[in-house]
C-alpha cells in the first residue's frame, strides 16, 4: 500500500502558474513526472496554456478551469494515438504564456537620425519614448520567438523590438518632411502613424503593439543655440531693443567669465553699442538724398563768436565793435617765430612757445 501511494504521488494532478514575475513564457516544471489523466488545469486571466508533444505544439487553452481528458485535448490525443477511454498518466511539455500588456517599455535612438530641414539644412536629431506590447497569438509567438527555453522575459526581446521601432521612426520622420520647428506639434500624429506602420511587424511575431508614444525629439546643441539666438532677435523687435539686449548679453557673459574683468565687459558692451549705431546709420537716408521742403533742422548751426575783451559779450565774425559796450574788436596777432594765431591775452605762443 505504501509503494502504491508513492507511485501515485508522482502523478501531477494540478497544473497552474501564479504569475508574480515579469516573464512572458513560463514552463511548468513537469520534469520526469507524469501528468495524470483527469488532472485539473487552471488558466488565469491574461494567461494561455500550451501543451507540446515532443517539441510540437498540440493544444492551446485559454482562461478557465479544465479537467484534462481526451475530449478537450484532441490534438494531443491524435498525436499519442490514444483510445477514447484512455485513462493512464501521460507526459507532455506545458508552457504558460503571459498575455497581459507589458507597459513602460523604453525605446531611443542609439545614433542620430539624419534629416533635411528646409530652414536649417541637413541636421541630426535624436528621439526617445515608450511603448507597450502583449502576446496576441501564443502559439505563433512560441513558434517564431520563444523556441524551447524554460522561461522568457520581456528584456530578452526588448533589444530586438527597440531596433524595429527605431528603424520605423527613422523612415517615417524622413518621409514626413516636417520642419523641426513643427515636430513638437506632430508628436501624437507621428505616434499614431508609427503604431500603424509597426503593427504588422509585431503581428508576424505573435505580438500586438498596444501603445506607442514619442516623448521627445531633441536637436544638437549648436542647432538649439541657433534657434535660441533667432528667438532672441525676434523678441528684440527693433534696433533699439536689440542694442539693449546685446548690452545685457555682454554684461552677462562678462559676469560668467571673471577672468575678463571690467575690460572684457567694456569691450563687449562697446561692440554691442557700435553694432547698434552701425544699423542705425544704415537706416538713415544718405547725405545726397533730397529732403522734403517742409523739413527744417531742429537745431540751427552754431555761430563762431569771440568774447569781448571788455565785457565778455560774444562777438560775431562780422562785428567790429562790441554791441554791448562798444569796445573795438582787438586786432589779431600772429607769432613772429612760427606765424601761429595769437589771442590778445596770450603771453606765449601755444605752437612754438615764443614769448609774445
Image: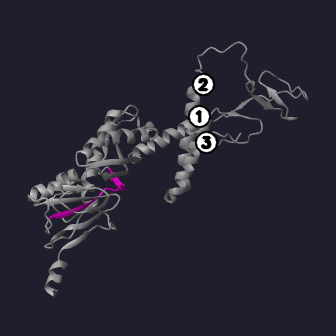
- Residue stretch in magenta: 92-108
> Would residue 256 appear left or right of 341 to someone viewing this image?
left
Q: Label 2 neighbourhood size at 10 Å, few (<14), some (14-19), many (20+)?
A: few
Which color mode does the image show? one colour
Give the left or right position of residue 123, taking residue 73 as reference: right
Q: At numbered mark 2, what does the secondary structure look like: helix, strand or loop?
A: loop
Q: Is residue 181 left or right of residue 317?
A: left
The residue nearer to you, when weighing 295 against 216, is: 216
Query: Quadrant location of residue 28?
Result: bottom left
Image location of residue 323, percent across then percent down? 88, 25
| Foreground label between 3 and 1 | 1
Q: Mark 3 — residue?
A: 244
- Residue at screen point 60% across, 25% down: 284
> Which residue, given by chain and number where applicable, does mark 1 sit on?
237
Q: Earlier in the sequence, mark 1 or mark 2?
A: 1
Lower position in the chain sequence, tag 2 or tag 3: 3
Instruction: Please say if 28 is above or below 84.
Output: below
Q: Is residue 295 above or below residue 274?
A: above
Numbered label attached to residue 284: 2
Amino acid at each position: 500500500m505504501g509503494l502504491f501511494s508513492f507511485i501515485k504521488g508522482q502523478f501531477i494532478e494540478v497544473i497552474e502558474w501564479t504569475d508574480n514575475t515579469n516573464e512572458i513564457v513560463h514552463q511548468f516544471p513537469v520534469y520526469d513526472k507524469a501528468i495524470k489523466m483527469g488532472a485539473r488545469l487552471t488558466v488565469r486571466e491574461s494567461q494561455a496554456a500550451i501543451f507540446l508533444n515532443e517539441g510540437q505544439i498540440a493544444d492551446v487553452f485559454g482562461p478557465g478551469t479544465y479537467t484534462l481528458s481526451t475530449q478537450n485535448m484532441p490534438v494531443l490525443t491524435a498525436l499519442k494515438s490514444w483510445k477514447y477511454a484512455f485513462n493512464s498518466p501521460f507526459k507532455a511539455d506545458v508552457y504558460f504564456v503571459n498575455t497581459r500588456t507589458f507597459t513602460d517599455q523604453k525605446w531611443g535612438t542609439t545614433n542620430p537620425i539624419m534629416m533635411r530641414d528646409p530652414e536649417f539644412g541637413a541636421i541630426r536629431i535624436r528621439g526617445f519614448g515608450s511603448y507597450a506590447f502583449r502576446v496576441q497569438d501564443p502559439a505563433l509567438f512560441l513558434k517564431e520567438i520563444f523556441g524551447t527555453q524554460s522561461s522568457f522575459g520581456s528584456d530578452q526581446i526588448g533589444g530586438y523590438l527597440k531596433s524595429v521601432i527605431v528603424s520605423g521612426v527613422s523612415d517615417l520622420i524622413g518621409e514626413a518632411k516636417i520642419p523641426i520647428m513643427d515636430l513638437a506639434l506632430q508628436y501624437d500624429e507621428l505616434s499614431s502613424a508609427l503604431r500603424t506602420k509597426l503593427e504588422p511587424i509585431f503581428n508576424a511575431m505573435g505580438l500586438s503593439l498596444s501603445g506607442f508614444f514619442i516623448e521627445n525629439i531633441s536637436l544638437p546643441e549648436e542647432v538649439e543655440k541657433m534657434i535660441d539666438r533667432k528667438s532672441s532677435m525676434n523678441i528684440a523687435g527693433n534696433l533699439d531693443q536689440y542694442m539693449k539686449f546685446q548690452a545685457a548679453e555682454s554684461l552677462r557673459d562678462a559676469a560668467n567669465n571673471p577672468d575678463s574683468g571690467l575690460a572684457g565687459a567694456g569691450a563687449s558692451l562697446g561692440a554691442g553699442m557700435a553694432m547698434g549705431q552701425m544699423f542705425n546709420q544704415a537706416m538713415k537716408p544718405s547725405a545726397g538724398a533730397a529732403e522734403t521742403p517742409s523739413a527744417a533742422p531742429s537745431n540751427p548751426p552754431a555761430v563762431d563768436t569771440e568774447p569781448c575783451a571788455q565785457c565778455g559779450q560774444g562777438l560775431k565774425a562780422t562785428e567790429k565793435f562790441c554791441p554791448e559796450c562798444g569796445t573795438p574788436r582787438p586786432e589779431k596777432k600772429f607769432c613772429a617765430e612760427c606765424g601761429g594765431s595769437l589771442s590778445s591775452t596770450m603771453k606765449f605762443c601755444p605752437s612754438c612757445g615764443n614769448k609774445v
